[in-house]
Image: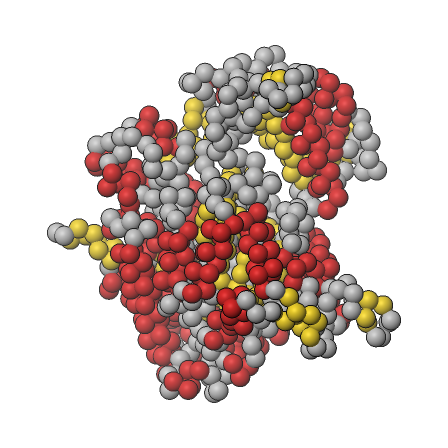
Amino acid sequence: MSLKLSENALKVLERRYLKRDESGKVIETAQEMFRRVARAIAEAEKNYRKTVKETSELEEAFYKAMTSLEFVPNSPCLMNAGRDLGQLSACFTLPINDSMDSIFETLKATAMIHKSGGGTGFSFSRIRPKNSVVKTTGGVASGPVSFMRVYDAATEAVKQGGTRRGANMGILRVDHPDIMEFIVCKENNKEISNFNISVAITDDFMKKLKSGEEHSLVDPHSNQLFKKINPKEVFDLIVKQAHKNGEPGIIYIDKINADNPTPHLGKMESTNPCGEQPLLPYESCDLGSINLAVLWKKDDQGYKVDWERLGEVSRLAVHFLDNLIDVNKFPLPEIEKATLATRKIGLGVMGWATLLIRLGIPYNSEEAVALGEKIMSFILKEAQKKSEELAREKGVFPTYKGSTWEKQGIRVRNATLTTIAPTGTISIIAGPCSSGIEPLFAIVYYRNVMDNDKLVEVDPLFEEIAKERGFYSRQLMEKIAESGSLAHVEGVPEDIKKIFVTAHDISPEWHVKMQAAFQKYVHNAVSKTINFPHEATLEDVRKAYMLAYDLNCKGITVYRDRSREEQVLNINHKSESPVAKESKTEPGKITPRPRPEVVFGTTTKVATGCGNLYVTINIDEEGRPFELFTQMGKAGGCAGSQLEAVGRMVSLAFRAGVEVKSIIEQLRNIRCPSPSWEKGQRIFSCADAIARVIERRLANAQTIHPIPAENQAAMAMKRSFGEDIHLEIDSQADIVGMCPDCGGALRHEEGCIKCHCGYSKC
């Protein structure tokens, strides 16, 4: 059958998924990739005495589901199935006990998992608190947060699967004595940057929070009371930090364990990096997503869910994910043993917002919430049917005896069946398809500038409907791209505005309600970001946390627009003047000019003695240098903070109108112990490299022309710089930085940071 993939999908596949030869040349097509995966997963049937014909027929069914983009497994499966590495799981959790042996054995296991392309989750709750006496040495303990820093540094040193840094989840129970230190450990976004962090909140804590009783902190080593504390102090600090930069998240650990299917094997203490997959120590889980965006049909009454095909795909996906466990090559024997013991799978969805739009249902409506419940209930029912069928054919999961399934008298192949995971790059592959159960993040946006023209990216479904209804025009699309939303744009029919809502058109309450609707029929948990506008208050965040708990969500992640320090691209109000001006309140003092609504920039890569340095210089509407940002390939620590400081000071100088040559003179020839050569020139330090980029981009430019409405800025820059440049146009909310792969905009989505090019970091 023909495979219809978008341009973005093909780019993502070529960059990350398709096989390459020793020289790095792509030697596989998308069809061949799906065939490779289908064949490898179907091969598991041979372990159960299935005939060649039966195996071949199953391979064809898997291939059809993937090439029709109705079902897509997690990235490690697409990358590694049928290849030598063969590691197909996306997420793992590892135990950390209160001993140096355990801490560093787990660190070694973490490195092996990251090397194979997986993400890891840990609970640091068993480690004794900071300043506890260590009897064997007479010294004092350094506490959980200090060991998180060790894990973070190790993660930084290991390339995950050769393509990206490893992702971790760090969890601490709310009754641990070091909980206050943990809550603020990511106050500086440059620290512990390879971790998402979450507080494990108990039902007892929530009860005492509501009643005003004191909350007990307990030393996990001695199991003795450490001290009592006002739970409001803890909760207020969580709210304050989440409002500030989205960290920490919350997991409601007792709700998670209430749904633990194998309590006889132990309690669950941690989750994978995005929080949607609680697991026992050493367990892994295999994830895959049904693409709801294509599972519809049209009749005389309009568009409807294709329930028949949705059922077929749900059952086939369970078969696929169960087979995946049998052919998987696990990174550690302990992981293989634990995974085979419960055979957990996580079937989820993507394209939910796209389906709602196709059906004409607003995301922020009771109708959408009700349909979400109905669809997930249907998927779970069909998934359980298939797991029961597989149990009859191949046997129940080995630890079935003593499980909650046995107590219900239901024989299943898999201890868990459903998870709503981030779909990051696989939703790009399946596109046009919205991520997970998230709403759209922009209807129209500017991608970059090429050949002296703006490249406007339009949601394909919006473009289709706009053309059908006769209101499509390039001018209107450009107007929408200024904000990404239709909310305040004239020329778009009101009924269209209601269904094409973006994340920031939707109140946090509707975000939580949608998460809760799916959670009702999800065995594991739901990855979802609760978006807040920049103006949201602490009380707004507090209400969302309480609502999530009351609606039985298993966790919650919030993000307030523009709340991260490194958010370099965002929407701001237009300034009174684009140039630095004398302060109205303090005559004689210079006030740096405010950031305009749109900036244009170049990103230059320079090889330094410390690694590749990426220097971005942005100019404003009048062609004046406005700001400078840096990113080091191995960011973090002292070097990262110094680079940030240099970038901020140079930006301040630009905005205050300091002569460019003076800035260059201050930075040129500063020396460090690790000089390098770049294109025949000696680079003495990162500061020296920055000076050379400024000189090359600005001081040597013949002229930087003002920017008229027709976008002559891009033309002027290309004339001035005389070479290919990448320009990112700033038009949307929730942008938190620059993509290290393509230089594009990074956004918060499903608890991850992702770019439209396919890059993601969870």
Q: Residue at x 44, y 73 (%)?
A: 416
Q: How is the image coloured?
A: secondary structure
Number of dots carrying numbers:
0
The answer to whether residue 645 is above or below residue 507 is above
Q: In the picture provided, is 349 more to the left or to the right than 285?
A: left
Report if residue 341 is visible in the image.
yes
Residue at the far front in the pictured view: 212
Q: Residue at x 59, y 51 (%)?
A: 241
Report if residue 424 is visible in the image.
no
Location of residue 229 by image quarter: bottom right
Given residues 63 and 670, the one toward you in this image is 670
Location of residue 161 by image quarter: bottom right
Q: Where is residue 6? Give x, y as percent.
A: 38, 43
Q: In the picture provided, is 195 more to the left or to the right than 530?
A: right
Given residues 167 and 442, the one toward you in this image is 442
The answer to whether residue 658 is above or below residue 351 is above
Residue at the far top in the pictured view: 702
Q: Where is residue 603? Give x, y as percent.
A: 59, 31
Q: Where is residue 316? Give x, y as percent.
A: 35, 67
Q: In the picture provided, is 103 more to the left or to the right than 306?
A: right
Q: Residue at x 29, y 53 (%)?
A: 365
Q: Where is residue 510? Give x, y as percent.
A: 37, 53
Q: Residue at x 39, y 32 (%)?
A: 481
The answer to whether residue 394 is above or below residue 238 is below
Residue at the far left in the pictured view: 300
